[in-house]
Amino acid sequence: MNEHHASQAADPCAFTTDFADSEYRFRLNIVGLEELEEKCGVGMGAIYMRLHSPNYTLSDVRETIRLGLVGGGLRPERALTLVKRYVDERPIDESWLLARTIIGATMHGVFTDPATAPVLAADAEPEEVPDGPATHSVLSSVGKSRFGARQQP
């Protein structure tokens, strides 16, 4: 799942990548975002921040992927089947980065040039906390999230 392709030049928030048993298109549209907020019990910004921290929930991960598949054009029944088989039955880390990428593409778009992608607060260098030691996100040990993508050939 290392390679993401911008799926349409006209849709900067959609991308295609390997998932489960094939390549799938992912896109969170407004209806999907509203359902995601309802399923997770918080707003989109909170889901985004949780997915970029160690405070994410299973619903944050699985619902982001499920709704990203539906927004990408998959039938809801098929999306649910894939999530049950390839998210619920696998280690969560396999799905967490995909969910993070889906919500990031929704917020920032899909970047074909990693140099132009924004550096997220969760990816910033450690900073001093007034009453404690330097802190940094768990993402620093996982890698920078730049939502890099490649155009499809």
Image (spheres, grey):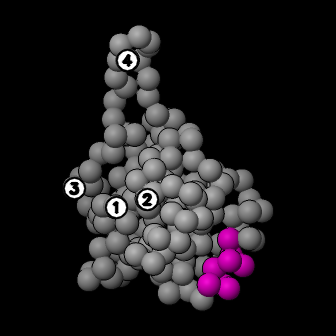
Q: Amino acid under label 3? A: Thr
Residue indicated by mark 4 = 129
Magenta: main secondary structure: helix
Residue indicated by mark 2 = 44
Magenta stretch: includes residue 50: no
- Categorize mark 3 by other alpha carbons within 10 Å: few (<14), some (14-19), many (20+): few
Give the alpha-carbon distance from disc 1 to disc 2, as whole Å. Answer: 9 Å
Tell which tag, 3 or 2, sits nearer the viewer: 2
Residue indicated by mark 1 = 107
Give the alpha-carbon distance from disc 3 to disc 2, as whole Å. Answer: 23 Å
Sequence order check, earlier mark of 2 and 4:
2
Can you tell which mark lies on residue 55?
A: none
Are the two marked residues, 1 and 2, in contact with CB atoms closer than 8 angstroms? Answer: yes
Element on which disc 3 rests: helix
Element on which disc 4 rests: strand
- The reply to whether residue 1 is in sight is no
Q: Is residue 62 above or below residue 13?
A: above
The foreground one among 29 and 141 is 29
Q: Amino acid under label 1? A: Met
Position of the N terminus, as image quadrant, is: bottom right
Horizontal and vertical percent for residue 108?
30, 61
Horizontal and vertical percent for residue 99?
53, 60
Sequence order check, earlier mark of 4 and 1:
1
Give the alpha-carbon distance from disc 4 to disc 1, as whole Å. Answer: 27 Å
